[in-house]
Amino acid sequence: MSKEKVMIFDTTLRDGEQAAGSRLGAREKLEIARQLARLKVDIIEAGFPASSPEDFEAVRLISEQLDGPIICGLTRARAEDIEVCIRALAKAKRCRIHTGIGVSDIHIEGKFADDKYGRTMAEKKANIIKMAVNAVRQAAEFTKDVEFYAEDSGRAGREYLYEILDAVIDAGATVVNIPDTTGYAIPQQWGELIRDIRANVPNIAKATISVHCHDDLGLAVANSLAGVKNGARQVEGTINGIGERAGNAAIEEVVMAILTRRDFFDEVETGINTREFYRTSRMVADMLGMPVPANKAIVGHNAFAHSSGIHVDGFLKKRETYEIMRPETIGLAESRVVLTARTGRHGLVHRLEEMGYTLSKDEIEKAYERFLAIADRKKEVFDEDLAAIISDEIHLIEQTYELQYLHVACGTGTLPTASVKIKTGDETRQAAACGDGPVDAAYEAIRDATGQSPKLENYTIRALTGGKEALGEATVKIRDDSRSYVGRGISTDIIEASAKAYVDAINRMVAMQGKGKAVEDRNSNI
Amino acid sequence: MSKEKVMIFDTTLRDGEQAAGSRLGAREKLEIARQLARLKVDIIEAGFPASSPEDFEAVRLISEQLDGPIICGLTRARAEDIEVCIRALAKAKRCRIHTGIGVSDIHIEGKFADDKYGRTMAEKKANIIKMAVNAVRQAAEFTKDVEFYAEDSGRAGREYLYEILDAVIDAGATVVNIPDTTGYAIPQQWGELIRDIRANVPNIAKATISVHCHDDLGLAVANSLAGVKNGARQVEGTINGIGERAGNAAIEEVVMAILTRRDFFDEVETGINTREFYRTSRMVADMLGMPVPANKAIVGHNAFAHSSGIHVDGFLKKRETYEIMRPETIGLAESRVVLTARTGRHGLVHRLEEMGYTLSKDEIEKAYERFLAIADRKKEVFDEDLAAIISDEIHLIEQTYELQYLHVACGTGTLPTASVKIKTGDETRQAAACGDGPVDAAYEAIRDATGQSPKLENYTIRALTGGKEALGEATVKIRDDSRSYVGRGISTDIIEASAKAYVDAINRMVAMQGKGKAVEDRNSNI
């Protein structure tokens, strides 16, 4: 029997990134998009171009640079959104516009309360179909590949849902996306909904049914799979299951379930290169600063670990006793490559390519410099160190302030004290301060030297590599009157990493101030 | 219609703890057990008494101290395991013995390969039924409440599974546990398995069917719910979904799905007090040092956060647009209590009780001392700070080495340098060292002063409370020839926290050496 393909629609860069707190730049999004292309996802939703200039630029850059997957941009069912999206996608080899509108009574009442959308519910509903059809027609003039999302389908009235789907398919939609926007569905019911849509929408054979599930009740993956079993041929999700609230369906779980349980999902297959899962997961976690929990299915640190006695015993006697998947299938290498100060530029580039990073010549030079500096201080440089370097180097913003010097003294019975020198323009300013701890002291000194005093919202530090010669990554979140900024810093010295992160966050804040576009302008629909 | 009760069986202290890397002491397990009692779980699996003296002590202490839930101990189908378990449970008001054996061909071949279990598969299978029946009979002499687990039921031959279940129910098992040991099941199939067991095991009406699902394909919660829909009346799981490999079904997700979707699960209800979910989740995360990921369903930091523009817009217009559950239902308070140096002993105890901690008089005194020391350095003391203090105070081990003094200097162009004074017995030793960073320098100095040089396996640090006056918690994992030891340290100074954690880990190592019981002896069956 020849199998039907389930398309994998990745929205890590749109639904995933918007929830992370830490925003990615266009260059970083491009790097993740390249890795997603190696993973062979079918569609990459690169952003929501009308939501911000940064999102526009990310979609534009990815469209221009990337071969392989279809590049998709999100829009509301509004002419101006679609116009902006078309401009962002202009250079893509293959592109898709993803537009749509809310279809449940609760959404219509909540979001289209204004009389201008109609005074009665019936009027509002008729109007919404018109808006949907117009949006799809407008998009279809630019590309033959148009996806329509029926927001909050899970709570929508069935007859109205069938009607609007029929109308948008007539208008040119080639994919209809059924999102469980609030994560309310139960697999059995969700499967029935997809089956009913197939049975009741007259022209459904002309379109692909897509499922987009959220994890509020812990059922996103199960609902997506129930959709596939009942005829959905596209699944939307994110790497590591990140996303709004409790997140989206984790692509690695959906794909590995279809593969591992091919006896059950015998009619379908995906085109995913599962061996890229591990490195994709790591790249997304590193770039967004959202570590993967140890017990995350498929890609968590413990997912293939067999810690307990009887398990280990059984595992060694017969591997299949406790293992339903092989770690190699997701690209989890058993041996790790170790680089040292003697590794040349060529060896570094080779390893970076193996990790999924593609750098320009300039970027390679900078990365190599950083690599040597770290290799001088550490015997071995690990993949995590490299990821941190790369993330630092391609996360470029203007350096208004540069940390030139830092000295810290602390300990039992010592008042934690820090002194800093900060370069800004041609000027170098110095300051000293005390604090609750060495980090607090350093931050006070930096505030003094820069004259900036944002509110500190959050501070975390984690060791990127285990063992004695750990590299620490600090992440700080600061806030001015309008929005939050996240800064990161990396060093073998965790105090230095913390100070760098703070200066980085301040530089981001200063760079953004005056641009005026607040983060609250970014929108998600589904 | 009167609803049937689904019993909630919590195995956080057994299946959850064994995977965490960081072992809990009996006193800590008791504190979590008390919180689980407030959550009103029906059964607490407190440990596997035969696996180690620590596990025995935990089950014994919880049996002696706790009112409310049934206290359960795990055993293999071996007479000696059951004897030890009976001794551990002796003082429980209500107790259960949980015994069982592998029933799938793959498990039988892998774990009972020896000819002593029978030369043919048929002989082995007959023998396994005998072992199972004998174990259940032995347990039933001590308590009327006996649960039997049929390990790897999901991959077992159906007829054999029915046969062994019928035999153990005849022998006195009142609960039969159907575990998806390897996390291989798909909800639809898992539901059918439970339905088939009900239809094909002649005496099944005499026992409760329990489901115990693992999350290897991301389906643990969905499988548990499919079990309930098809007649299972007990669900086994853990808080935060921690557990072996990808973890167990998350109790908070299972219970909130049954509650939120009571229209679908209309025949059943649980007895859980959902308002205790948030604090239970926090306590388990804090005690095991396993932070809850931001996008974890129900209890994650973002689970009730509405970050994106359209979502926020819709949310404000009409709350139900994007919210299917209310944060109050899980006990997420909108306002936080803040304690300061002016808070008295009484206020502290009151807040600790609100957080779920019950301390002895001595422990309160120690906690109050620590609280004042921190309140002196910080303007506000948060719940996280308190959790850290408590965890430190009740995690007692002998202090062979005590860190009396620490001084560290580091920064740009400074060779990171640390000096320490360590007290051991009547002697005080001092040492100084340089390192890659301040933590590395401090560790080298501690190694020098203690004369201990374990291998450092892992080092992490996290800020427990956001904002300027953060309290840092460092966790280190060290290793001697036979096993790993985890140490923790807390301070507003992250370097001091790191040094304390290292000394704590060394103290644990020294305390354990000579006791001889290796961690590999701890076992899990399902």
Image (cartoon, coloured by chain):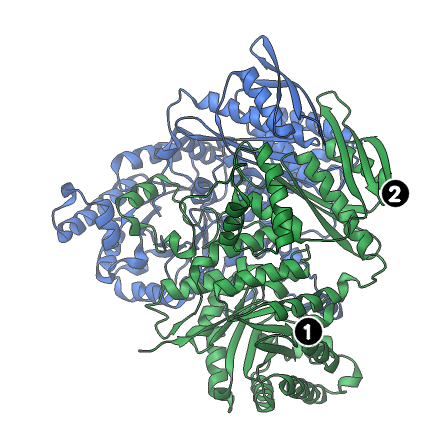
Chain colours: A blue, B green
Residue B351 visible here: yes
Q: Is residue B436 above or below residue A175?
A: above
> Which mark is drawn over residue B88?
1
Residue at left offset 30%, top offset 34%? A83
- Crowding around mark 1 (Cα neighbors within 10 Å: few <14, some 14 to 19, many 20+) is many
Q: Is residue A485 above or below residue A467?
A: above
Residue under pointer 2: B451
Q: CA distance from mark 2 to mark 1?
A: 38 Å
Q: Position of residue B45 (x, y in %)?
A: 60, 69
Closer-to-camera residue (B208/A237): B208
Of callouts 2 and 1, which one flags the residue occurring earlier in the amino acid sequence? 1
Q: Is residue B399 above or below residue A376?
A: below
Q: State the residue lying farthest toward the left.
A: A119
Residue at left offset 25%, top offset 58%? A161
Closer-to-camera residue (A393/A414): A414
Q: Secondary structure at mark 1?
A: helix
Name the amino acid, label 1.
Ala
Residue at left offset 54%, top offset 32%? A476
Q: Secondary structure at mark 2?
A: loop
Name the amino acid, label 2.
Gly
Q: Relative to B86, is A38 on the left or the right? A: left
Question: Pointers 2 and 1 in contact (CB under 8 A)?
Answer: no
Closer-to-camera residue (A97/B261): B261
Q: Pinpoint the chain carrying mark 1.
A: B
Residue at left offset 43%, top offset 77%? B230
Q: Is residue A73 above or below residue A373?
A: below
Q: Relative to B448, is A372 on the left or the right? A: left
Q: Position of residue A391 (x, y in %)?
A: 59, 33
- Crowding around mark 2 (Cα neighbors within 10 Å: few <14, some 14 to 19, many 20+) is few
